[in-house]
Image: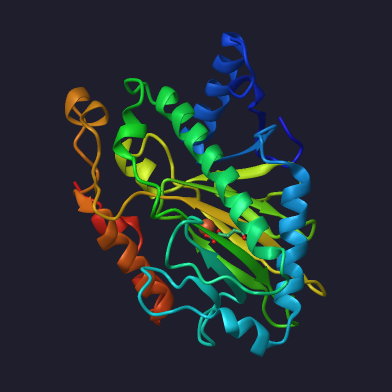
Amino acid sequence: MGCSGIPTIDISPFLKEGVDEDGKKKIKEVISEACCQYGFFQIANHGVPLDLMMQALELSKTFFEYPDDEKLKASPGSSAPLPAGYSRQPEHSPDKNEYLLMFPPDSNFNIYPQNPPEFRGVLEEIFLHLTKVGILLESILNECLGFPANFLKEYNDDRSWDFMVALRYFPATENENNGILEHEDGNCITFVFQDDVGGLQVRKNNEWIPVTPIPSTIVVNLGDVFQVLSNNKFKSATHRVVRAKGRSRHSYAFFYNLHGEKWVEPLPQFSKDIGEPPKYKKFQFKEYQQLRMRNKTHPPSKPEDVINITHYAITP
Ligand SMILES: O=C(O)CCC(=O)C(=O)O
Ligand SMILES: [Fe+2]
């Protein structure tokens, strides 16, 4: 266990040659417990080189410090399902950050900054590393949930909707310090790494727990897809970002996603087969992603009108 209030799990037994069945079993127990309770944990020894993570943070910092006209050269085109390239939250948004979004390196949607010149290569490399971590974590969760071998791999067999965001949160002002309001992620699994400023908080037993930055670890939080598939057995993590005074915060969030054409619903082994009513209606993933995108482009004036997974909840 780490000292930051959420478990830090060394996942090297899943990456090393040889069979450490005991080691793997313990990891699955800790992950299952964390996912049943609140849906987040941190991983260490995950295979992403620390110097690459550090370099990615340094380069995004350099990029975000450029004047607007340089950053805006990487502004999104209109055809992508999400705004690829550089964007800033709209003025009226309560979230005070700017970001650079990319799809997998082979996607035609990507718009890369030309400067700093090494940025693109590092973004592409880290994206591929995080994709591998996503595939590994999904296979571990497959075992935690007792699915047949490769069940999630076959269900989630297209990586083209995955995306990664490099974020910069502006320093807090005297009057407000929100970076991202309390939310759950709509995807399958999110991976976050961050600089040393801090500000990410996760809700556990109704308390906000700060996720203290540890340079080599990656924060993992479960998204709504897992909560729905498991009919609420696994929880989509509630989290937020609070801005620090005096310093910008930089982080990367990698969204291991689902293809938009896929349908999502509680699986029979967590509902019908065990006599539990399904807690969600079946929905197509792209519809949900579009509704969530609208939350961002046209933020509703009342926070209760923000669409989240309860939109599909079946109330008994
Ligand atoms: O920057 C972070 O630490 C978290 C970002 C996040 O929660 C999100 O983009 O959904
Ligand atoms: Fe999030």
Q: Residue at x 78, y 60 (%)?
A: 197
In terms of image quadrants, where is residue 87? bottom right
Left or right, 203 with reference to 146: right
Residue occupying image coordinates x 48% and y 78%: 76
Residue at image coords 41%, 51% = 187
Residue 41 lies, with reference to residue 307, above or below; the image says: above
Horizontal and vertical percent position of residue 14 = 58, 22
User: Where in the figure is residue 108, as x and y percent of width and height?
Assistant: 42, 65
Q: Is 272 or 166 nearer to us in this picture?
A: 166
In the figure, is residue 163 to the left or right of 154? Answer: right
**Which quarter of the figure is the N terminus placed in?**
top right
Q: Quadrant of residue 15?
A: top right
Whether residue 296 can be seen here: yes
- Whether residue 314 is situated above or below residue 86 in the rendered picture: above
Residue 164: where, in percent of width, then height? 53, 58
- The reply, left or right, for residue 2 in relation to residue 6 is right
Which residue occupies the extreme bottom position in the image? Answer: 69
Residue at the image point whose x is 35% and y is 26% from the top: 150
Left/right placement of residue 311 relative to residue 97 reads left
Picture layout, residue 86 above or below residue 123 = below
Whether residue 212 appears in this view of the structure is: no
